[in-house]
Amino acid sequence: MFIGSTRYDHFSPRSVIILSREALLKNTELPSFLKYLIFICNLCGSCDVRCPAKIKITETIKVLRNQVLAQDASAAVV
Ligand code: SF4
């Protein structure tokens, strides 16, 4: 599932990085879909091994989860 010219798969680690980068650059709240993505990840670590850019996806997801939970503990329920 690709969105127009942005070339990202909705349910991929790439989406996590793109959406979190956009929120960081715009200094806005994390979008609800990103919150959903970070809480459906089971932190298996496969992304870390397979990422060609060596991005530490699971560490990024943990940081994002902590950020969301610090703002709203009920956000963990998806
Ligand atoms: S770490 Fe595992 S569960 Fe999480 S997004 Fe990557 S492959 Fe999926």
Image (spheres, rainbow, N blue to C red):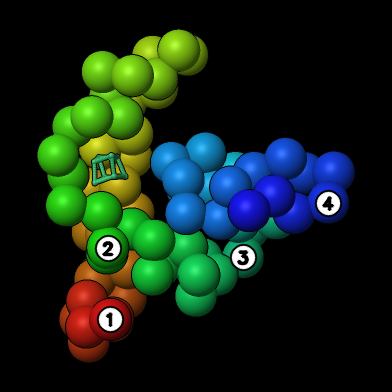
Report which residue position mark 3 lands on. Answer: 28
Judging by the rendered image, the residue that carries numbered circle 4 is: 4
Q: Earlier in the sequence, mark 4 or mark 2?
A: 4
Residue 29, image quadrant:
bottom right
Look at label 1 and name its amino acid: Val
Mark 4 to mark 2: distance in Å? 24 Å
Mark nearest the camera among 1 and 4 is 4
Split into quadrants, the picture shows ligand 1 in the one at top left
Q: Residue furthest right?
A: 5
Label 2 secondary element: helix
Q: Is mark 3 within 8 Å of ligand 1?
A: no
What residue does disc 1 label?
78
The local secondary structure at tag 4 comes to: helix
Dot 2, how many residues are within 10 Å of its Cα: few (below 14), some (14-19), or many (20+)? few
Q: Residues within 10 Å of mark 1 (few under 14, many from 20)?
A: few
List the residue tagged with mark 2.
Answer: 40
- The percent coordinates of residue 73 (x first, y second) are 20, 81
The answer to whether mark 1 and mark 3 are in CB contact below 8 A is no
Task: Give the vertical position of 59 relative to 53 (above or below).
Answer: below
Q: Amino acid at mark 2?
A: Ile
Q: Disc 1 or 3, which lies upstream in sequence?
A: 3
Residue 43 point in image, percent of width and height: 17, 44
Q: Which residue is depicted at the point 14% across and 39% down?
A: 44
